[in-house]
Image (cartoon, rainbow, N blue to C red):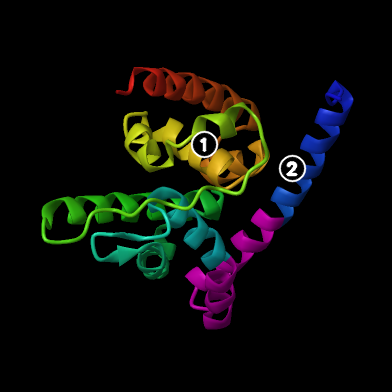
């Protein structure tokens, strides 16, 4: 049975409330940490670490990228966050700031792996634990090993939204908070990204 419009709106409202509470807490910790509060910094890092590790795993898989694992890249991200908090603007969502740093660290890791030809090739990532649906169909069917190559052919914003929405299972509201957008814009971008991804899948050898 499909959800009614009222049910969808209600779910969105609940997601917005949860996302707003989380963002308010993280922003408060980030504000205190940026002013030198060591305890707030420790709490902030503890709260964001699972999300950053999950993001990195979604981007590179469960193996290694060159000599770095997802946990290594996540640790680099957290260290960068510590050094960059003073540049964070309190009127912006801190998770959008953090995911931006994580994305850059993943790109750096890919570049480093590309320069070092002595390192092993990438291992196949674990398949995301997802329910059935059109997004999941694009990720399964024996092509998980090709997914990252296909994602790399998408615009950066499309790729980020697919990773957050599909691989990490975040809601449209949560994704919007992470990338500094709106839930409506996230849904439109996700639709366009999936359309392009399907085209790439159909054209693959």
Q: Residue at x 55, y 48 (%)?
A: 128
Instruction: Out of 141 and 55, give the one closest to the viewer.
Output: 141
Percent position of residue 2, x then y? 83, 24
Q: Which residue is mark 1?
A: 140
Please say if the residues under marks 1 and 2 sit with CB atoms less than 8 Å apart.
Answer: no
The image position of residue 154, as x and y in percent, is 37, 29
- Which quadrant is home to the N terminus? top right
Taking the spot 87% from the left edge, 30% from the top edge, the residue there is 7
Q: Nearer the viewer, residue 106 or 121?
A: 121
Q: Which mark is residue 16?
A: 2
**Most common secondary structure along the magenta stretch:** helix
* Disc 1: CA contacts within 10 A as few (<14), some (14-19) or many (>=20): some
Q: Earlier in the sequence, mark 1 or mark 2?
A: 2
Image quadrant where residue 64 sits: bottom left
Q: Nearer the viewer, residue 179 or 55?
A: 55
Which quarter of the image is occupied by the C terminus? top left
> Which picture quadrant has residue 11?
top right
Magenta region includes residue 41: yes
């Amino acid at each position: 049975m499909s959800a009614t419009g009222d049910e969808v709106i209600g779910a969105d409202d609940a997601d917005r409330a949860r996302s707003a509470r989380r963002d308010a807490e993280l922003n408060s910790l980030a504000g205190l940490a940026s002013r030198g509060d060591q305890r707030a910094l420790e709490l902030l890092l503890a709260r964001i670490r699972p999300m950053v590790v999950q993001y990195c795993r979604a981007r590179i898989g469960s193996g290694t990228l060159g000599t770095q694992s997802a946990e290594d890249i996540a640790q680099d991200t957290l260290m960068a966050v510590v050094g960059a908090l003073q540049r964070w603007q309190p009127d912006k969502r801190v998770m959008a700031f953090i995911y931006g740093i994580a994305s850059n660290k993943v790109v750096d890791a890919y570049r480093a792996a590309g320069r070092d030809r002595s390192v092993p090739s990438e291992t196949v990532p674990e398949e995301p634990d997802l329910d059935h649906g059109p997004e999941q169909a694009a990720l399964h069917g024996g092509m998980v090993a090709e997914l990252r190559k296909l994602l790399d052919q998408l615009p950066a914003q499309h790729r980020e939204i697919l990773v957050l929405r599909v691989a990490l299972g975040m809601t449209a509201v949560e994704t919007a908070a992470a990338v500094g957008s709106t839930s409506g814009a996230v849904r439109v971008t996700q639709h366009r990204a999936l359309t392009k991804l399907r085209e790439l899948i159909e054209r693959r050898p």
